[in-house]
Amino acid sequence: MLVRDAMSSVILTLGPAHTLRQAAALMSARRVGAAVVLDPDAGGIGILTERDILNSVGLGQDPDTERTHAHTTTDVVFAAPDWTLQEAARAMAHGGFRHLVVLDRGDVAGIVSVRDIIRSWVPARDPAPVP
């Protein structure tokens, strides 16, 4: 199975000036653990994860004043849609992260997460039979 088969192609995109509270609210509403941050002044494509927000709050920073640009990972490891899920899982395990931004010909095509990979590898449980 390939990354394109497991990735989420509907992605949350943020700008560098969003506050962490705005980012958290949007991520929660969309039920996603990561957002792509487009910041042409900081090199283009970055990623903000729930862990980035958690780390900031844990440090006592104010989510109403902290901006995404200060917490965005910009040295992103990108996946290609034609990578196997094993290649994606290996990159995540090697890098110690849970999300990969998927690029197709230089454009953001989606995000694949550890959860997406697990869902692809392990079929969903059938509901318990009714007696």
Image (cartoon, grey):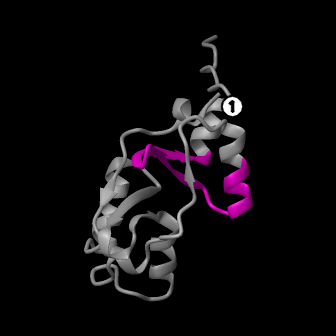
Amino acid type indicated by mark 1: Trp
In which quadrant of the rendered image does the N terminus lie? top right
Disc 1, SS: helix
Magenta stretch in the rendered image: 90-114
Quarter in which the C terminus is drawn: top right
Q: Looking at the image, which is closer to me, 88 or 50?
A: 88
- As displayed, is residue 46 above or below residue 32? below
- Check residue 46 for magenta coloring: no
Residue 15 screen position, x and y as percent: 28, 66
Which quadrant would residue 99 be assigned to in this image? bottom right
- Numbered label tally: 1
Residue beneath the point at 66% across and 36% down: 84
> Where on the picture, by quarter, is residue 8?
top left
Q: Is residue 3 rendered to the left or right of residue 91?
A: left
The answer to which of 59 and 117 lies nearer the viewer is 117
Q: Position of residue 77 (x, y in %)?
A: 57, 59
Position in image of residue 102 (x %, y %)? 49, 46
User: Is 107 or 5 nearer to us in this picture?
Assistant: 107
Q: For mark 1, what is the residue?
A: 121
In this view, the residue farthest toward the front is 105
- Residue drawn where x is 45% and y is 63% of the image: 47
For this rendering, which residue is in front, 52 or 59?
52
For the point 40% across and 87% down, which residue is it?
A: 61
Instruction: Please tell me how crowded label 1 is: few (under 14), some (14-19), or many (20+) other residues with Cα within 10 Å.
Output: few
Above or below for 118 versus 49: above
Which of the 4 quarters of the picture holds residue 96?
A: bottom right
